[in-house]
Amino acid sequence: MPKPVVPDRFEAGYLDRMDGRTALAAEMRARWQELTDDLGGADRMSYAKRSLCERALWLEHWIREAERALAEGRPEDFDVSRWVYASNSLQGIFAKLGLDRVARDVTDLREYMAKAKAGGDG
């Protein structure tokens, strides 16, 4: 079974290439879903926003791994300048994406029923 690794350097599409049987892949995909849902759904987002989401998740993972090294008493594996740079980059991406949840457009039930009765698509 392939090792559940997030690449050391960002590679577009890394989430799709992760072995879905691993806990790490499941966690990363759940975080993708949560982030894109907060932004109104991946299907309603531009390519640029989806790309930023993928990068944000990669940075977030990298930051967590760096913090884990420090917490586990491996300060030699923690580079504070890289951590600061990554944290600032993540903050910038989140600022571009927006920090507020975006409501999905939901068809009103009465409107849906009226369209269905009239023979519309719904």
Image (cartoon, rainbow, N blue to C red):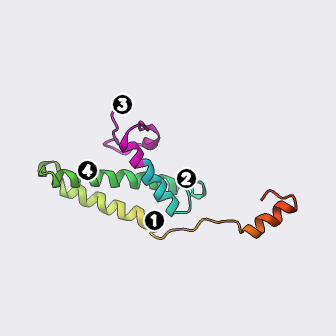
Instruction: Give the x, y percent position of residue 21.
Output: 41, 37
Look at the image and give the residue range highlighted in magenta. 1-28
The residue wearing badge 1 is 96
Q: Which residue is mark 2?
A: 47
Mark pair 4, 2: CA separation: 27 Å
Q: Marks 4 and 1: which is nearer the front?
A: 4
| Local secondary structure at mark 2 | helix
Marks 3,1: beta carbons within 8 A: no
Please tell me which of labels 3 and 4 falls first in the chain: 3
Q: Amino acid at mark 4?
A: Glu
* Earlier-in-chain disc, 4 versus 1: 4
User: What type is the residue that disc 2 sits on?
Assistant: Tyr
- Asked if 26 appears above or below 38 in the picture, the reply is above
Q: Residues within 10 Å of mark 3 (few under 14, many from 20)?
A: few
- Viewer-side residue, 82 vs 50: 50
Residue density around tag 1, few if under 14, some if 14–19, many if 20 or more, within 10 Å: few
Q: Is residue 20 magenta?
A: yes
**Residue drawn at 41 percent across, 36 percent down:** 19
In this rendering, position of residue 102 left or right of residue 11: right
Based on the picture, tell me whether residue 15 belongs to the magenta stretch. Answer: yes
Q: Which mark is residue 113?
A: none
Q: CA distance from mark 3 to mark 2?
A: 28 Å
Residue under label 4, please give it: 65
- State which mark lies toward you, 3 or 2: 3
> Which quadrant holds the C terminus?
bottom right
- Mark 3: amino acid: Pro
What residue is shown with label 3? Answer: 2
Q: Nearer the viewer, residue 42 or 94?
A: 42
Question: Considering only vertical position in the picture, is 79 above or below 21?
Answer: below
Considering depth in this image, is 113 or 101 the residue closer to the camera?
Answer: 113
48 with respect to 59 (left or right): right
Taken as a whole, is the magenta stretch helix, strand or loop?
Answer: loop
